[in-house]
Amino acid sequence: MASLKPFHATDLFRLNAVNLDVLTENFHISFYLTYLVQWPTLFFSTENPQGQITGYMMGKTEGKDKDWHGHVTCLSVADDYRRIGLARQLVDNLERRSEDPYDAYFIDLFVRSSNTQAINMYKGFGYSVYRRVVDYYGGDPEIPDEDAFDMRRPLKRDKNRESIRENGEEFRISPDQVFQ
């Protein structure tokens, strides 16, 4: 059993069980705090009955017009709490909050094209690949660059489902085209 809780700055000192996993992206404290200040209702966690953080979601809103959307910046669940529905609970909460009060058209996220476990999880949540961003993950000369899938799920406001497309894996763009 886990409860959804608003994230607080002091929770950063309690993330070790979640962030010490190789699948979790880690950020500088200032990055976390920026999200907490700018999108406090889109940054939340789950806790077990003992008060330990078992997972968290960092989200934001961005875009304009029909591109106005919620974005999954980071979703992470502690290893011992995977496959019991916490990721789904966190994603559902971000979707609800992106619809009300933000009135977003869709939710999106970026995932490494090699991360089949995450891709399949998000597909199970109703997301589909909108496009492939070629060499999105890169910059380290010792690690080969890797493509990202921009995955999306339309929300209620996107009645015509314009935010998704068929065969998005084949629609290739460069990283500099992401925000155009």
Image (spheres, grey):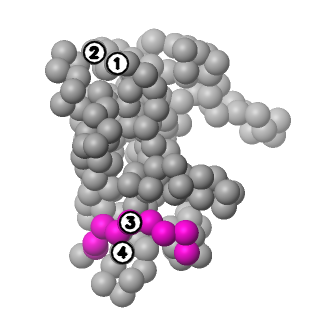
Circle 1: element type: helix
Q: Is residue 176 above or below residue 83?
A: above
- Tag 2 and tag 1, C-beta contact below 8 Å: yes
First in sequence: mark 3 or mark 2? 3
First in sequence: mark 1 or mark 4? 4
Q: Nearer the viewer, mark 3 or mark 4?
A: 3
**How many angstroms separate mark 3 from mark 4 (CA)?**
10 Å
Instruction: Give the residue at mark 4.
Output: 47
| Residue 78 placement, left or right of 14 | left
**How many angstroms separate mark 3 from mark 2 (CA)?**
32 Å
- The percent position of residue 110, horizontal first and vertical second, equals 49, 35
Q: Is residue 137 above or below residue 36?
A: above
Instruction: Give the residue at mark 2.
Output: 162
Q: Nearer the viewer, mark 3 or mark 2?
A: 3
Q: Residue at x 40, y 51 (%)?
A: 42
**How many angstroms separate mark 2 from mark 4 (CA)?**
36 Å
Is disc 3 surrounded by few (<14), some (14 to 19) or many (20+) residues within 10 Å?
Answer: some
**How many angstroms separate mark 1 from mark 3 (CA)?**
28 Å
Is disc 2 surrounded by few (<14), some (14 to 19) or many (20+) residues within 10 Å?
Answer: few
Task: Tell me where the magenta segment starts and ends, as one range.
Answer: 2-10
Q: Is 77 within the magenta?
A: no
- The percent position of residue 97, horizontal first and vertical second, equals 29, 47
